[in-house]
Image (cartoon, grey):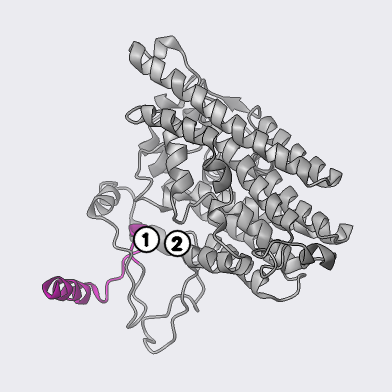
């Protein structure tokens, strides 16, 4: 044990003073507080194998205008205090303490029911196949930076930050809800938001099957079985969400959330797609279209859930609109952050991994370099025909990633501006910390 610690200490001393870019996975030296993220060597090798990209020069141009002098200390002044960067896991953990319990498991009550337990037994049969349902299940239980189960947490934090105009509802709240300052109906709404979002993700895992694409009969049978499980499990969560929504007995809330479900469906039929429903960008596709598409696919549920929780709390129309705007802006920032990950997180998304061709960095790059759009549209009826390693390298060299970062920051700042209208509280501070963690895109 002591030998291992000594070895690690020696390695750290050897690394002291390095000046490697954030793209490579190591933060620049900031005086006496050098900090490393210990990216595996295979990630470093992936970067080094791209001769036309210089990670250090790329990072200098990419982050130079976005990272403030207070975040990274100049090497000429080693005594200056280093500002600690926001941490996503810490921000979420602290926020969960404020609202009472880990909201990452808001839908656990449904997931542990007999019906879902039976489905889980069948899902085990898919192990070893390439069905997307397995990837979705893995992401649902992954407790890390890309945790998808955070929407209910934001709804509850906004509920507490805004306060409740009907104190009598808090008096009859559960013992767990009273300290959190939210009503039972607001916590139910947070659970409903999580279940609808989870059901949507599971439904998106359904694969369009063509017998000619699966000459092996066993593989086709496995994929067909996976589709059936995805449809049944998604429908079950969605039906439970609708039942809970009716139990709230508030017609405006029912209207808001039900229209967000229809927005999910509408988003699936926007634009050109290949045979597996992967979006393909078209000429003259603008960022307004990116915003419209992602509002339907992600922003609508977040925005309307934030508005609905203020409806349940008895707030004015003006306050409800602020909740809607906050939810929309944080959803846009969240989506821009997700779009950037294939180009910033080379460990989880090594070059060559498929990514959304209608993501912000791709569209922003194609606006200035339309020749890449011509290549993308040459894929025919399947994006599998494209060389995603070439696409990744080309976009990394262009302006799309930097402009995508600016887009993420822009929407995050708008969300912070809306929060400024709420009274200062621990819930508001927790929401601000979450936004700052989203803005930390490296």
The residue identified by callout 2 is: 61
Q: Is residue 247 left or right of residue 398?
A: right
Q: Which residues are magenta?
A: 1-26
Q: Describe the element under mark 1 as helix, strand or loop.
A: helix
Rendered location of residue 144, percent (x, y): 44, 55
Disc 1 to disc 2, how far (Cα)?
6 Å
Query: Splitting the image into 4 quarters, where does residue 244 fall?
Result: top right
Q: Are marks 1 and 2 in contact (CB under 8 Å)?
A: yes
Q: Residue shown at 72%/58% (left/top)?
A: 326
Label 2: how many Cα within 10 Å (few below 14, some 14–19, many 20+):
few
Say whether residue 22 is magenta.
yes
Between 190 and 129, which is closer to the camera in this rendering? 190
- Residue at 56% across / 64% down in the picture? 96
Q: Which residue is mark 1?
A: 57
The label on residue 185 is: none
Q: Quadrant of the N terminus?
A: bottom left
Q: Where in the figure is residue 128, as x and y percent of width and height?
A: 32, 29
Label 1 environment density (alpha carbons within 10 Å; few <14, some 14–19, many ≥20): few
User: Residue at horizontal 75%, vertical 38%?
Assistant: 258
Q: Position of residue 165 (x, y in %)?
A: 84, 66
């Amino acid at each position: 044990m002591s030998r291992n610690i000594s070895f690690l200490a020696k390695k750290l001393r050897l690394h002291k003073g390095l000046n490697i870019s954030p793209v490579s996975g190591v933060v620049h030296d900031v005086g006496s507080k050098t900090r490393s993220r210990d990216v595996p060597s295979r990630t470093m090798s992936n970067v080094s194998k791209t001769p036309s990209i210089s990670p250090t020069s790329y990072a200098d141009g990419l982050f130079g205008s976005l990272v403030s002098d207070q975040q990274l200390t100049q090497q000429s002044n080693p005594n200056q205090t280093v500002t600690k960067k926001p941490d996503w896991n810490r921000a979420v953990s602290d926020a969960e303490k404020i609202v009472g319990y880990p909201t990452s498991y808001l839908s656990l009550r449904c997931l542990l029911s007999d019906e879902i337990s039976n489905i889980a037994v069948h899902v085990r049969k898919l192990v070893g196949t390439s069905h997307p349902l397995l990837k979705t299940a893995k992401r649902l239980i992954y407790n890390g930076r890309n945790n998808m189960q955070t929407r209910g947490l934001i709804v509850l934090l906004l509920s507490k930050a805004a306060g409740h105009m009907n104190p009598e509802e808090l008096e009859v709240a559960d013992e767990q809800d009273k300290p959190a300052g939210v009503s039972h109906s607001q916590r139910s709404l947070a659970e409903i938001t999580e279940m609808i979002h989870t059901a949507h993700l599971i439904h998106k895992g359904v694969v369009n099957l063509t017998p000619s694409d699966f000459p092996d009969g066993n593989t086709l049978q496995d994929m067909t079985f996976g589709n059936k499980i995805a449809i049944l499990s998604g429908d079950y969560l969605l039906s439970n969400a609708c039942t809970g929504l009716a139990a709230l007995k508030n017609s405006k809330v029912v209207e808001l959330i039900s229209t967000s479900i229809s927005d999910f469906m509408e988003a699936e039929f926007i634009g050109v797609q290949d045979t597996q429903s992967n979006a393909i960008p078209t000429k003259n596709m603008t960022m307004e279209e990116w915003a419209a598409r992602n509002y339907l696919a992600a922003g609508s549920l977040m925005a309307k859930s934030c508005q609905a929780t203020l409806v349940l709390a008895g707030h004015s129309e003006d306050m409800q609109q602020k909740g809607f705007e906050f939810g929309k802006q944080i959803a846009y920032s969240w989506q821009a952050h997700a779009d950037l990950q294939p180009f910033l997180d080379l460990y989880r998304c090594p070059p060559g991994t498929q990514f959304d061709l209608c993501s912000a960095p791709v569209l922003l790059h194609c606006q200035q370099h339309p020749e890449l759009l011509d290549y993308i549209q040459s894929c025919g009826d399947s994006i599998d025909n494209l060389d995603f390693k070439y696409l990744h390298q080309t976009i990394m060299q262009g302006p799309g990633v930097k402009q995508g970062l600016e887009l993420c920051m822009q929407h995050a700042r708008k969300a912070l501006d809306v929060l400024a209208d709420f009274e200062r509280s621990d819930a508001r501070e927790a929401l601000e910390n979450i936004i700052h963690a989203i803005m930390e895109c490296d």
